[in-house]
Amino acid sequence: MKQETSEEKIILTKEEYKSLLDRTKRQPLIYDSFDKWDNLESLEVFSDKQILVCFDTLENCAHYPHHIQGEWTKRRDISILSLLTFCGLRPGEACSLRFDDYVSAEDCLLIRPENNKQKRGRKVPLPKQAKKYISNYLKMPKYIWANSEFLFPSFENKQKPLSSRTWKYIMREKILKPSGLWVAPTGNKNNRVPKFRSYSFRHSFAQKILSNSAQDLNAVANLLGHTNTRTTKRYLHNNKEYQDYLREVMER
């Protein structure tokens, strides 16, 4: 796969974030009963530079076989990574996508209710950064999918989607460890998960989009698939841009 420059893989611009939100505003916000506040864990986020390192590491990974099936697998994994990074999808949502969920005419993805713990479906706009990787992936010969209904099937069994467990392994062994970003959990009460993991891309996306549209929590909640804006507000806790916005309001 041709290596691309950092400029070609630029993180979403402010205008592109606003475009995503404008397309999401047309969806009604779904409120659900919400009796308790989620544990305000430390939400680790990637810097733009670290995200580029993750893409470069996966693109140059030497663990993929040097044949067409190996190239297909690499493009599949990079496509999933792009959906976590540029769409803020949960890992399980991305891995479980079917071909029917990709509406190319509208440049959007349909997230099925059964693929997240909230049991809520939604439509997510597909930005050009992610579409580029998906389009490149879909250029592979169709026979490799073996008539699978899944967009990202398992290599071993094409009639099943890539499992979240397998993706977790890919994330750890092919992205985080080789890039030097892996920090193993210690196992104590306050450190039971790795510092960086698949959800860190979602957290990074949420922080970025709130930095550009913190005043429109409803649209951000829709885009992330939250059932309540209180969940979305977790990301405002350490959001410098939002704190600056509040300070500006107070000083008017």
Image (spheres, rainbow, N blue to C red):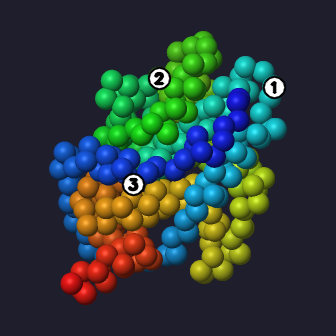
Instruction: Classify mark 2: helix, strand or loop.
Output: loop
Mark 2 or 1, closer to the camera: 1
Out of 134 and 16, give the one closest to the viewer: 16
Amino acid beneath label 1: His
Percent position of residue 204, x then y: 50, 60
- Give the residue at x 40% y 38%: 126
Identity of the residue drawn at 31% across and 40% down = 123
Amino acid type at image mark 2: Glu
**Is any part of residue 81 visible from this angle?**
no
Task: Say which residue label 3 marks.
Answer: 14
Q: In front here: 144 or 160?
A: 144
Q: CA distance from mark 3 to mark 1?
A: 38 Å
Q: Position of residue 171 (x, y in %)?
A: 66, 50
Amino acid type at circle 3 is Lys
The local secondary structure at tag 3 comes to helix
Examine the image and state in which quarter residue 226 appears: bottom left
Q: Nearer the viewer, mark 3 or mark 1?
A: 3
List the residue tagged with mark 2. Answer: 149
Dot placed on the residue nearer the N-terminal end, 2 or 1? 1
**Residue 244 occupies which quadrant of the picture?**
bottom left
How far is mark 2 from mark 3, CA to CA? 35 Å
Label 1: which secondary element = loop
* Residue drawn 31% across the image and 83% down it: 247
